[in-house]
Image (spheres, grey):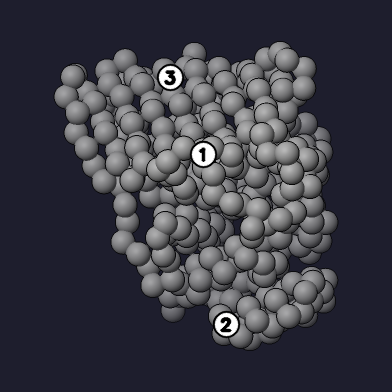
Amino acid sequence: MRSVTNVALIGCGFFSANHLHAWNDLTDEGARLVAVCDVDAAKATAAAARFAVPRWYDDAGQMLAAEDIGLVDIVTRMDTHRALAEMTLGRRIPTVVQKPFAPTWEDCLAIVRAARAAGTFLAVHENFRFQAPMLRVAEVIRSGVIGEPSWARVSFRTGYDIYAGQPYFYDEDRFVILDLGVHVLDLVRVLMGEAIRVSCETQKRNPRVRAEDTATIMIRHVSGAVSVVEATYETRKLPDPFPETVLEIEGDRGAIVVKPGLIMEVTVDGKTESEHLGTALLPWTSEPWHVAQESVLTTCRHMLERLRSGRDADTSGADNLKTFALAEAAYESAATGRAVAPPAADLD
């Protein structure tokens, strides 16, 4: 008989529905949602009712004390992550934290240190690398058909009104690099390898936004490859590919291009083959969100499998520090006007 992992979720805001659907879909694989929590009791009760979760709480400490929990999924705003993660890890409860990991480098380090001190599983729910199209791109690169990747552009440019659902973005001290850029930076790490230096230019194109809403980042990788990362919510071009990531990757034998519409073109030895990277809709997904929604399920499945096998997740806390380090370097580069080496993690 399959063993069961009791899952509790903290944070019942707009994106949490995807996590709750995912954990319910993983019931046959050993996940069991036992409780949800939100400081807004109305959100907690609504989530519990909608997803048939037995108990709800409006105090995370009370939930952790009352429940037998095998995994906590923190789906709250980043400014709450450190306090909540230190609370769960202090009880040696395996923990998944939504991206971005935390507002600052020091906060991220503190969370990873807490996990190491507790000897407890910690992962960041970084889902872009688990999107079906990006998994396929990574597979093609690993196959070697385009040779050694030497240059890339990975882009998420949209004019979608992100502020309608998350109006607090107007007032963030650091915005697009931490909200959107970390996704693309994580992808670049997966596809092109680790970085040795980062150059970045930021812009504030929307006058209502306090911080940067556009970032153009150039990265020199350990391999010698160079990549360009683009992130903005302020493009006005049509058609708008939202919420798709588009990219170009060049190697010494060929190239990969992912175009809007989830079309991948692989050119090798002067011949191009096309492949549609779309996936079938799950019962709870809908276009154009389905690729991102499905990736939440894939990410949660990966977390569950790794926890139950006693192994770190690919997006462990320690791994995500390398992604956050690129964001930190990008901010420093934009402020100083020079190329910056990503900070090294001092976990002692």
Q: Position of residue 252 (x, y in %)?
A: 31, 15
Residue 306 visible in the current orientation: yes
Q: Say which residue appears at 53% left-offset and 65% top-offset.
A: 18
Q: Position of residue 260 (x, y in %)?
A: 36, 41
* Label 2 element class: helix
Q: Say which residue appears at 52% left-offset and 42% top-offset.
A: 158
Assess whether mark 2 and mark 1 are in contact (beta carbons under 8 angstroms): no
Q: Quadrant of the N terminus?
A: bottom left
Picture layout, residue 17 above or below residue 186: below
Q: Residues within 10 Å of mark 1 (few under 14, many from 20)?
A: few
Determine which residue is flagged by label 3: 151
Determine which residue is flagged by label 2: 50
Q: Residues within 10 Å of mark 2 (few under 14, many from 20)?
A: few
Assess whether mark 3 and mark 2 are in contact (beta carbons under 8 angstroms): no
Choose mark 1 or mark 2, whichever is in front: 1
Q: Amino acid at mark 1?
A: Arg
Q: Between 115 and 159, which is closer to the camera in this rendering?
A: 159
Q: Amino acid at mark 2?
A: Arg
Q: Quadrant of residue 77?
A: bottom right
Q: Quadrant of the C terminus?
A: top right
Q: Residue furthest left?
A: 271
First in sequence: mark 1 vs mark 3: 3
Horizontal arrangement in the rendering, residue 63 relative to residue 149 (left or right) = right
Q: Say which residue appears at 55% left-offset and 76% top-offset.
A: 32
Determine which residue is flagged by label 1: 236
- Per the model, the C-alpha gap separating discs 1 and 3 is 26 Å
Horizontal arrangement in the rendering, residue 65 relative to residue 35 (left or right) = right
Horizontal arrangement in the rendering, residue 153 relative to residue 43 (left or right) = left
* Label 3 element class: strand
